[in-house]
Image (spheres, grey):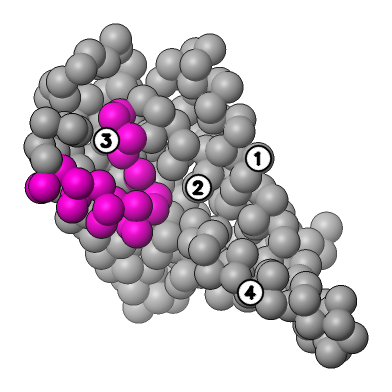
Amino acid sequence: MRAQQLQRLQGVGMGFLAGYVDTLGFIALFGLFTAHVTGNFVLIAVSLADPSQTPSLLKLLAFPAFIVGVAVARLLVASCERSGRPARKPSYLLQLVLLAGFMVCGMLAEPVGKTVGALAMSAGLLGTAAMGAHSAASKLLLTDLAPTSMMTGNVTQLVIDSVDQLRGAGDAATAKRCGKFFWPVLAFALGCAAAAFLFLALGFVALAVPIAILCLHLWLPDSEAQ
């Protein structure tokens, strides 16, 4: 398989993973967005204005947890770059460990009640940190692909390019961008739908799906995938 095809496969897989984990966290943990910083700003504001509406501490801590995930991933990639080692597998391994922690803490917290216990809190923060690491890795290592967790920008660019194509103002670069942004958006949407059904059926065990995706990407050789 060509390197370009493998990169596209990574983009699709990571887009699916981001939509999946974000939706599962939202359903399982009181409307928490693990991958959607914009949504968490809204939730923080709502929690501050009316703490009775949502478990506010988890929402307040989610943003710094996301930042920690981004920072750790950046330091990891920088360390690999200094030593001349490929950073792709270590970054995926970091995400895998954090998502495994999310799953284990969530399983131990089940059934999650109407208040956020210590295990549910840990699950949410680990999931948010995992998606911070995911977003950083996407931006740092998959630079030729569309972002895998920032769908607002992706959809905006996709619509702009699609309109230009339809009005006859597009060119080969426009058509290429349409494909570049279409597949991660579709994968993200499919990940959202899959998580909604599988979490309701399986609970936190459903996080085995994104963990399996990361294991598959860890299996790909660095020389081919980069």
Dot 4 and dot 1 residues touching (CB under 8 Å): no
Q: Are marks 1 and 3 in contact (CB under 8 Å)?
A: no
In the rendered image, residue 17, in percent from the top left (x then y), is placed at 54, 43
- Seen as rendered, the residue at the extreme front is 50
Q: Quick check: 82 above or below 47?
A: below
Marks 3 and 2, how far apart at CA: 15 Å
User: Which is more N-terminal, label 4 or label 2?
Assistant: 2
Q: Quadrant of the C terminus?
A: bottom right
Residue type at mark 4: give it. Gln
Tell me the CA gap for discs 2 and 1: 10 Å
Verify whether residue 47 appears in magenta: yes
Mark 3 falls on what kind of element? helix
Q: Which residue bears the numbered disc 1? A: 190
On the image, the x and y values in percent for residue 59 come to: 20, 43
- The label shown at residue 140 is none
Q: Quadrant of residue 55?
A: top left
Q: Amino acid at mark 2?
A: Ala
Q: Disc 1 or 3, which lies upstream in sequence?
A: 3
x%, y% of residue 63? 22, 54
Point out the frontmost of discs 2 and 4: 4
The residue segment tinted magenta is 29-49
N-terminal-most mark, 3 or 2: 2
Which residue shows up at 35% across the image and 44% down it?
33
Give the alpha-carbon distance from disc 1 to disc 3, as whole Å.
Answer: 22 Å
- CA neighbours of label 3 inside 10 A, class few (<14), some (14 to 19), many (20+): many
Q: How many marks?
A: 4
Please state which of residues 12 and 154 is positioned toward the viewer in this rendering: 154
Rendered position, 73 above or below 101: below
Quarter of the image with the N terminus in it: bottom right
Q: Is residue 197 left or right of residue 107?
A: right
